[in-house]
Amino acid sequence: MFELHERLAADTHSLGQSALCEVRLMNDRTWPWIILVPAVSGIREIYQLTADQQMQLLKESSALSKGMMELFGGDKMNVAALGNMVPQLHLHHIVRFQDDPAWPGPVWGAQASVPYGDEELRRVTEKLQPVLELLALPCI
């Protein structure tokens, strides 16, 4: 039975479910930042997914990356699966800008998180709807 790690649940807002993943918005309005969490129990690494699940994750990650870059017009898309603090497999998708507070370094530890307010969360979720609709479609 899949269960979202408590740290991911606490630090993010649900944007729904894709064909494979829980789609989560990091509660930090500094960067457009979405996390894909494969809804597969006990997985820590991409290689632990089945071949079909790996392909699905790649398709979803690529579609999400492309959609976010088109929506937010960033200079670079950062995609990372670190898992040092949260062992559950999850992929960060962060749109980066040359004038953002951490450029060109990593976003982790650059500054304290700046949480979304209710209205801003509604607006960014609405803006992301076209991308989220694409992710809900099975790709396999």
Image (cartoon, grey):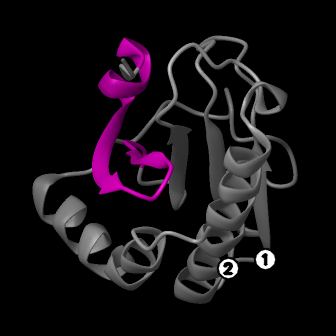
As drawn, 80 above or below 8: below
Report x, y in % for residue 130: 38, 85
Q: In which quarter of the image is residue 98?
A: bottom right
In the image, is 74 to the left or to the right of 29? Answer: right
**Residue that badge 1 annotates:** 75
Q: Which residue lies furthest to the left in this view?
A: 118
The quadrant of the image that shows the C terminus is: bottom right
Label 1 residue SS: loop
Is 131 placed left or right of 110 in the picture? left
As for residue 85 lying within the magenta part, the answer is no
**Residue 64 makes an appearance in the image:** yes
- Residue 65 is labelled as none
Q: Position of residue 110 (x, y in %)?
A: 68, 34
Query: Relative to 39, is 101 above or below?
Result: below
Q: Residue at x 30, y 55 (%)?
A: 15
Q: Residues within 10 Å of mark 2 (few under 14, many from 20)?
A: few
**Residue appearing at x 63%, y 74% in the figure:** 63
Please tell me which residue is depicted at 63% across the width and 11% down the height of the picture.
85
Q: How far from the left and from the top, in percent, is residue 38?
A: 54, 38
> What range of the chain is rendered magenta?
5-28
Identify residue for label 2: 66
